[in-house]
Image (cartoon, rainbow, N blue to C red):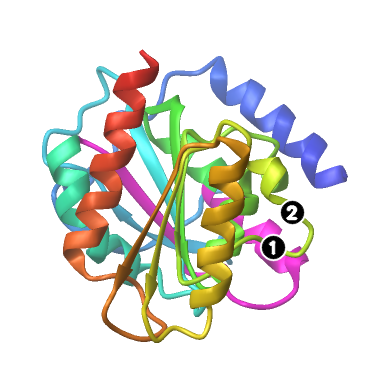
């Protein structure tokens, strides 16, 4: 609770200040690690599209790998982020384990991104694989935000979230045909469709893994289409 109050205070303070414009970011490159200004024990991988500039606000996707390997999802979604002008951030601290640690890691990347980058808060997305997919689906409740969409790969919802809690949040799932979570993903798709929520599940040949690059592109393209529909 104390950290939640502290985060709200920090974000209110940051909202009154211009985003930092003097950091010499490498554009069009995966930067890893970036050390959090607020908590040096936290770091993340970052991708800024080659046309990134501080004169406007940009869509962003927060990514979660179950092993805390932030560079993996950033590299996977890099081509799509470049095509559509998205920022990518992936925690190096969030991994399968206690939810307290996941909450701290998710909060750290959220806070640092808003302190240093120009973000369009109406276009915040989340993506994750396996346990990281459960983090991405639960990000709305963890941080009290409303994502514009979730890309869940090889994993469904956390145990404390129900399909009904995904109301209004577009969900794009991916799963390998031989993934041990295949049945869970098919069932989640069925439940979301029954509830009338925007969703799509793409199955690829393979086991338990992040999806191939063409599906990563398809997922981001699908999110872009949903965004245009809502305009």
What is the CA distance from the residue labelled 2 to the residue labelled 1? 6 Å
Residue 112 lies in the magenta-colored region:
no
Does 67 sit left or right of 29 as displayed?
right
Relative height, residue 53 to residue 116 (above, below)? above
**Region rendered in magenta:** 85-109
Does 79 sit left or right of 95 as displayed?
left
Relative height, residue 29 to residue 111 (above, below)? below
Residue 54's tag is none
Q: Position of residue 208 (x, y in %)?
A: 42, 83
Which residue sits at x=40%, y=45%? Answer: 61
**In the image as oriented, which residue stretches furthest toward the right?**
1
Tell me the quarter of the picture where residue 194 sits: top right
Image quadrant holding the N terminus, namely top right
Residue 158's tag is 1
Q: Nearer the viewer, residue 187 or 8?
A: 187
User: Could you tell me which secondary element the residue under label 2 belongs to?
Assistant: loop
Which residue sits at x=36%, y=77%? Answer: 176
Image quadrant holding the C terminus, namely top left
How many residues crowd around disc 1 within 10 Å: few (fewer than 14), some, or many (20 or more)? some
Residue 98 lies in the magenta-colored region:
yes
Q: Which residue is mark 2?
A: 161
Does 94 sit left or right of 177 as displayed?
right
How many residues crowd around disc 2 within 10 Å: few (fewer than 14), some, or many (20 or more)? some
The reply to whether the C-beta atoms of the residues labelled 2 and 1 are less than 8 Å apart is yes
Relative height, residue 172 to residue 72 (above, below)? above
Which residue sits at x=47%, y=62%? Answer: 128
**Is residue 39 in view?**
no
């Amino acid at each position: 609770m104390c950290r939640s109050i502290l985060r709200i205070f920090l974000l209110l303070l940051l909202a009154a200040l211009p985003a930092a414009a003097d950091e010499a970011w490498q554009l069009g490159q995966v930067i890893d690690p970036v050390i959090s200004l607020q908590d040096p024990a936290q770091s993340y991988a970052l991708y800024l599209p080659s046309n990134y500039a501080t004169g406007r606000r940009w869509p962003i996707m927060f990514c979660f790998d179950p092993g805390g390997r932030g560079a993996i999802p950033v590299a996977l979604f890099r081509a799509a982020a470049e095509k559509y002008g998205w920022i990518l951030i992936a925690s190096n601290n969030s991994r399968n384990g206690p939810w307290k640690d996941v909450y701290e890691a998710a909060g750290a990347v959220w806070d640092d991104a808003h302190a240093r980058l120009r973000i369009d808060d109406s276009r915040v997305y989340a993506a994750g694989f396996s346990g990281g997919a459960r983090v991405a689906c639960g990000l709305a409740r963890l941080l009290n935000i409303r994502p514009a969409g979730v890309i869940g790969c090889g994993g469904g919802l956390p145990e404390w979230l129900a399909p009904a809690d995904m109301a209004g949040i577009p969900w794009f799932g991916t799963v390998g045909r031989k993934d041990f979570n295949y049945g869970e993903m098919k069932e989640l798709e069925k439940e979301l469709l029954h509830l009338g929520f925007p969703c799509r599940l793409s199955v690829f040949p393979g086991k338990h893994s992040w999806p191939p690059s063409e599906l990563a592109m398809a997922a981001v393209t699908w999110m872009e289409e949903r965004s245009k529909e809502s305009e």
